[in-house]
Image: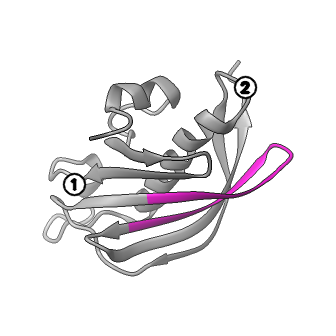
Amino acid sequence: MPVMSRAEIEAVIPHRKPMLLVDEVLEQTDTTIHCVKTFGADEFFLQGHFPDFPLVPGVILCECCLQSGAILLAHVTPNQGVVPVATRIDGAKFKRMVRPGEKIDIHVVLKEVVSSAYFMTGKVTIEGQLAARLDFACSVAKPE
């Protein structure tokens, strides 16, 4: 049973379809989050990547982690109404192709907070197999 539904996710981060890349939050603590996303064959980025052998682009897997991190930060940042903005991605590694119809598990861990910078590690797995891993940082901005 999800901890957060899609509607609840939309209440805490500004992403919307077609760029909302988290379907549900399954577990969450103050420093960790576990989300899921199932990629449909109709995803806009699959139309040209690649027509005869559709693959979810690695940058989309990174974005899944970033959005999961944003959901996590919505619960740990003291200010309401802030938008997490990616400031750095390090050491991204892609270990397994992700195809339409596959459901990914997204695990993000908040490692460190320095002033207004939040340092996290994200992992994408499919049935326990590592598909992608990255370290990233976000800061928070107040929309004008």
Instruction: Please tell me which of labels 1 and 2 falls first in the chain.
Output: 1
Q: In this orientation, which residue lies closer to the viewer: 120 or 53?
A: 120
Residue beneath disc 2 = 79
Magenta-colored segment: predominant secondary structure: strand
**Is residue 61 found left or right of 86 in the rendered image?**
left
Residue 27, visible in the rendered structure = yes
Q: Quadrant of residue 47?
A: bottom left
Residue farthest toward the bottom in the current orientation of the protein: 95
84 to 89, vertically: above or below: above
Residue 113 place in picture, x, y as percent:
78, 52
CA separation in Å, label 1 and label 2: 38 Å
What is the secondary structure assignment of the residue under circle 1? loop
- Type of the residue with mark 2: Asn
11 to 69, vertically: above or below: above
Q: Is residue 19 magenta?
A: no
Residue bounds of the magenta highlight:
107-124
Q: Residue at 13% across / 69% down in the picture?
A: 52
Q: Residue at 23% across / 53% down in the picture?
A: 39
**Is residue 38 found left or right of 72 in the rendered image?**
left
**Is residue 101 found left or right of 127 in the rendered image?**
left
Q: Residue at 71% across / 37% down in the picture?
A: 140
Residue beneath disc 1 = 47
